[in-house]
Image: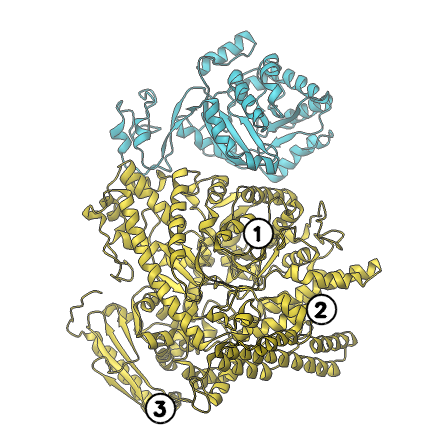
Amino acid sequence: MNVIVKKKKSSMDLLMRSLLNMVSFIFNHIPSKRKYLKTAEGWADLAVGIRTENYTVECGIVFRDGSVSVTDTIPDGRDVTLVINNDTAVKKLLSATPTDQIFMLLKSELRVDGNMTSMLQFFFLLSLLLSKKQIKQMNKERVTETKDILKNSPKERKDLAAEVNSRKQKLMKAERIDPGVQFLDDPYLPEYTLDDFPRLRKFLDIHLTRKPEVCPELPSLLTQWHRDHGFETNEEGKPWVPALRKAGAFRYLMENRKPIITDDYIIAGSTTSKEIGCVVYPDGSGTFLWNELLTIPHRTYNPFDISEETRNLLHYEVFPYWKHRNFREWVRDKYDNPLSQQMDERYALYFNWKQATISHTIPDFPKILSQGADGIIAEIRDELSRGDCDEEKRNTLEAMVLCLEGLILYSRNLARQAALDAEKESDPDRKKELLKLADICGQVVGGPARTLDEAVNALWITWIGIHMESMNAGMSLGRLDQWFQPYFESDMKKISGPDEKKAYIKHAVELIGHFYMKCTDHFPLTPDLANFYFGGSSSDQAITLGGVTPEGNDAVCDMTYIFLKVTEMLSIRDPNVNARYMPGINSDTYLKRLCEVNLITAATPSMHNDSAIIKALAPMGYAMEDIRNWSATGCVEPTLSGKHLGHTNMQMMNMVAALEMAMNNGRHPLTGLDIGPRTGLPEEGDFRTFDEFFSAFTEQFKFLIDSSIDYNHKLGEAHQYIRPTPLLSSLIGGCITKGRDVTQGGAVYNSSGTAIIGLADVTDSLMAIKTLVYDEKKITFTDLKQAINTDFNNDPALYAMVTRKVPLFGSGNDGAVGLANRIASWAHDYYGSLPHYRGGKYTTGFWSMSNHVAFGTLTGALPSGRRAGKPFTPGLTPQPSASKNLLDNIRDVARLDPVNMNNNIAFNVKVVPGAGDPQEKIVEDMFSYAKTYFDLGGMQMQMNVVTSDILRDAMAHPESYRNLLVRISGYNAYFVTLNRDMQRELIERAEYDI
Amino acid sequence: MECTEKAKLNTAGAVDTTPRHRNPLILEIKGNSLDDGPGIRSVVFFKGCPLSCRWCHNPESKSTGPGISHDAAECIDCGACVKACPERAISKKNRYFIDRDKCTLCYSCVATCPSGALSQVGNAMTVDDIIEVVSKDIPFYNTSGGGVTLSGGEPTMHMEFTAQLARSLKELNVHLLIETCGLFVYEKYMDLLAPFIDMIYFDIKLFDPVEHKKHCGADNTIILENFGRLHKDYQTGGTYILPRTPLIPGITDTRDNLTAIADYLSSLGVTKAALLEYNPLWGVKCEKIGEENPLGPEAQGRKWMDRDHVEQCRSIFRERGIEV
């Protein structure tokens, strides 16, 4: 770490202390504010230090036993110290909105040393005094920004919005019928549009217009139970077995949450008590909302409503209870704020997801559909009755039973509610539906499903339960077409007349439509930081369609096309639809339909090559039939359905940071962290060959990886203690027989998956260094470094050379592809060599959610000529300047070795249909790209079918584009909900005319 | 070179313009083309053309010889080329940057230019060179029903070379389309090239021979004859041929010209033709290769075509039963 020379205090110190004195006066003397200091846990106990890096400011504020005092130094036993860069940043902080505060944190103008939750609590107390001003300022900023954008495109282009909408009107017909399709006359179902489903249209309208609201139900019930039964120790003062504690709380939550049959739905139950709710998980990242409780309805991106009652509940009851009982603070307390955690909290190096959740897996739904929760309980009891149960096994299995009982209690409550609603219902048709729902919920989820309606309801109830246990972030649904098909078939076989059959198919479309819309009844609760990091992201509930069966046969069936029809009609961001395609086995008819749906929705489904995924996973030692049963998880990552805890989004790793550190002898420029190994400086002539520099890069990368894995293991331990997931464990193969929770390695297969960001940027940068400095010797490394330090402003000729004379990844150059493979292979081998806390391996993925924008913002200029602060390329997509020819991109990406990419990739392609081209021609062209890419071995591809003009128009006139869907890197989002940087990144992506 | 070829053409009436002494120059091989025939295609642009149409959209393709191009928009004004030029042919004061009278095409400047503003126009490529580039995309041709399009310039100007290339591509089972101005020796074409060609896009620009000579630098008698023979060949089971007419404002898009062409096509029993909409961006290309932009600042040719006008042009053909 740097050695700091303490400077004399400045005038800012005085200003800061006067402000703190004012704060302390108000909280000491004004009852309407003072009341906020008294929580259900007693008086707010909080000591905050504030200083600048060189101590020109140093003071503190202490809240203790209801009185507040200001200190001249960092208070003893402080919970947290805010370390501010310099006096200028102090000034900025004093007038900052909560969003600004987060940005200062990201840009390293401010860092937090200590308990992050305490800092957010302190910020909330400040916002009690400042919120009126803050809200006014936030509104003003928004208005100014909107005005600026309108200035650039004042005239709305109605024709552009009309073009996108008109795509839904020209539906193709299937050329052939796949062998697995038994009942659909035309699998493309062109006879239906959304107009045939007025209820779906209504739900969609609600989804797109209703502001989501923070739901207090889960945190309230959970906190209540723990207050009664304890957290660390039980009522008798004995240490709790974490799994049993979690199961007790879960059962209570499920039994006591409100059973809701939402108006007009033919699926019972809801994830929250609000029409569209955000779930607060206080043991995860919930407390991250503390500082925003007053301002969250007013922020620009993804504002949420919050009632006075909920705000008070969270501030007084919930957050104080969980202040130390969350993953992040548990690790901090136990391991004394470890460096690996501090590095994560600078936000520019890596982001580890376990601080919020694990989720990211695929439960064994076929099991609960076919056996019911009762059947699983019976299986567990059977296991318990064997003599060989150790204590952990017995506890784990008993916890599973409690959770499954909770699930059954909830479905019974739903059955009762449906019957009550039916009594009050005056519309006879709806009454019939409600009575049917009462019957369905009487059967499932305890008993096995017997019809498609029962199966869909059972799955939804289970899904709710899973989300009451784990956060709604990346938990995924799996191969729903495969798993619903048997129920659809058996229903269809009972129907004889052609009209009845047709009506039932329409019912199935509507049922799946209701299921999609139910999946949108909840939002992940994003703090403003997440708007920057994961802007516009939904819960990313991935559904996987098509591909091959575990035996390797064509899996495309009636339900595949029913799901595609619903995807096409609704064009919503979540569920995140992923389609598998096996070259040589799946039909052209199917792949064309995927392309047609992609064209109509502009962004979905994402397409995967089964043969490449199989190649990538085969060396992992998994059974082949399990590999063939893979499903996409969260964004794109493969999980072996129902048997695998692969925490596939364990981290977002900024690989470019390693490159920056290699050029700076281990120092990271933006954060100023000087912590990496001493690998040398280019300007000192420390790298005689390109390989020497490459080694410096891998040394730094290794350092970042080691740190992030250290933090992952510590967070993994926190999960084992704070949030075991017995319900999920009962639905993941291996856990029952082993008698271990999934967090303890109970699953048959274990792994954690990374998302490595910046493969194209790092490859191109290394190509520039290799080509110009070492191979052709056209420039010196010192010149290049100097140019980077000035963001290339000092040397336009060098900038031109770097950007024009270097063959990039995606240009069809063998050297660039070779280098990309070398980097990917190094990363794969190194991650793969590391021990894993649950057993299993670390896997490597090259996709980025939206972090190519976030990390890009926090990164300086690069040797590739990418300017400071600009986004990286999404996933591993080549730079727009790599080639004018899309085929070069496609060929190069397909030449990457799948073995190194066992957590999948995201390859974005923005294609632009020619004006007036017939829709069939556009689909044919998309089909040709996709099919050839897959034939060549490419792993994954996602197409955005929009022009930059459309996106620019949408930026200025969002009201005409509410559901304009875009693929970021792995997930879908509504373009109009993205932050401005992300919007610009999408506009600037290379676009290829078709 | 261009002049002598034209002279040969004019005096002899026969049109054997093949420069035999060396391989033709290739301007560019453009991959992923979706507008030059069916499916995904690679287009090989040959340098050199027996016509000299005033509006030629690829002015750099008219002459067979090599050239040099300077793109002012890409130039970062670093001066590296000025220093590199042994002939002192480069100066910002020159009207087109390079004094082409002094330039010996040594390309020293191209090698030093960091931005790529300077570039060589026309590369000598062997058949194998071209095959290497286009064969990378064979998987795309196969899934999309695409292939290679021979274009230019005029690919038939180098009949032996083109035939060799076509034979090699055919051996790889690549679908071949030729885009031609129609001015070639029919027998030679049939003898050397036709066996490998799957599809012909054939330009008929102006029907009136005098107008044709005026605007395109040569008489169109042979062109129309060739078209007639090839179309007959198609009607009797030969290679598919599609007549195409570029719409050039005030020159080819007149009612008289289009009516004459449409009548002619209809008399031959043609049922499908293509009208190519005018693209005004070609003017600036002239400046890059040191020629005056023939479009004055206010010229009609600076504008894109009016939708209604294009529709009127199409209707002339449609009225005669020709799909466009």
Q: Quadrant of the C terminus of chain B?
A: top right
User: Which amino acid is tagged 3?
Assistant: Ile
Chain letter of the residue beneath label 3 in the structure image: A
Q: Position of residue A757 (x, y in %)?
A: 41, 55
Same chain for marks 1 and 2? yes
Chain colored yellow: A
Q: Residue A453 got which mark? A: 2
- Give the residue at the far front of this rendering: A387
How far apart, in angstroms, are the residues tagged by discs 2 and 3? 58 Å
Q: Position of residue A529 (x, y in %)?
A: 41, 68
Which residue is rendered at x = 41% and y = 74% of the image?
Answer: A718
Label 1, label 2: how many angstroms apart (C-alpha)? 39 Å
Q: Amino acid at mark 1?
A: Leu
Q: Pointers 1 and 2 in contact (CB under 8 A)?
A: no
For badge 2, the amino acid type reads Asp
The disc numbered 2 marks a residue on which chain?
Answer: A
Of circles 1 and 2, which is in front? 2
